[in-house]
Image: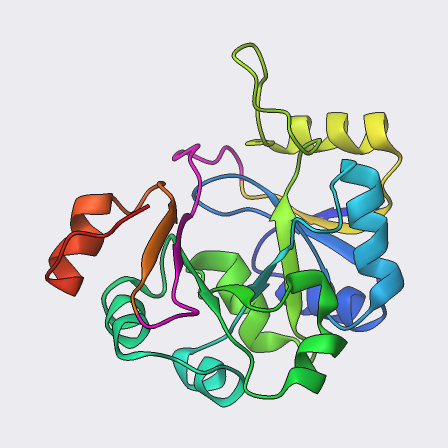
Amino acid sequence: MQQIPPDQLDRAASALEAGELVIVPTSRWYMICADATNAPACRSIFEGKRRPTAKSLVLVTPSLADCEQRFVISDEAHRLAGAFWPGDLALLLPWRDPDEGARHSAVGAPALVTNSPGPLGSLASLTRTPIAATTVNISGDAGIDARGPAISPEEVADFLSLTGVKATVILDGGVCPAVNHLTIVDCSTTDARLVRAGLVHERAVEAVLGREILA
């Protein structure tokens, strides 16, 4: 395992392309990443986190243009992406090609898609493989006394030691300040629907859409 500064993204990209796992900081917390088309690599994340396979990983798209090539994007989805990407919003989107969806089974159909700022977004732009990602923690670790996803390299190390997950590269971004989730909006049907509140506030989503958004 190599712990490297965020400006050495080329090493993380090479590891992903080789089928290995990497861990990347965001403003929210650390994320563990794999090639979204590499089933064994994605499976090792599910198994290490004890995460149900029905609970999809998030696909990190390098740009809205790339997203438009892969997914059917409604008018409301366009407006939300235009307002909040890159940022702390994820959209559930239907695949244009069901076969492509099958090749990215770890991120689901519809897929959970985000365009992230910082090192994670830069890595998505650099690597030749699509990135599937999730938080660095045991799945379901959200009780009142639970620490939640890792927000520092030390907590990442604790997770790796506890689970036996093999990550080749860890980008050391220090302590993540926001400690909150992505907001998730389901845009797979005509009317967008709030799935989970997070850093992008519900009122901000409603202001962009010009209507109340139902959960």
> Looking at this view, is 165 or 201 the one in front?
201
Residue 176 part of the magenta-drawn span: yes
Quarter of the picture holding the C terminus? top left
Image position, residue 205 (x, y; %): 22, 54
When the figure is inspected, residue 118 is found, relative to residue 188, above or below; the finding is: above
When the figure is inspected, residue 128 is found, relative to residue 177, above or below; the finding is: below
> Looking at this view, is 68 or 173 the one in front?
68
Q: In this view, does 207 lie to the left or right of 189?
A: left
Question: Could you say which quadrant of the image residue 41 lies in?
Answer: bottom right
Count of number-bearing discs: 0
The residue positioned 56% from the left and 10% from the top of the image is 145
Q: In this view, does 66 lie to the left or right of 5?
A: left
The residue positioned 52% from the left and 58% from the top of the image is 119
The residue positioned 29% from the left and 66% from the top of the image is 191
Image position, residue 66 (x, y; %): 49, 84
Q: Is residue 31 left or right of residue 90?
A: right
The residue positioned 51% from the left and 67% from the top of the image is 122
Residue 3 part of the magenta-drawn span: no
Q: What stretch is highlighted in magenta?
A: 174-190
Q: Main secondary structure of the magenta part?
A: loop
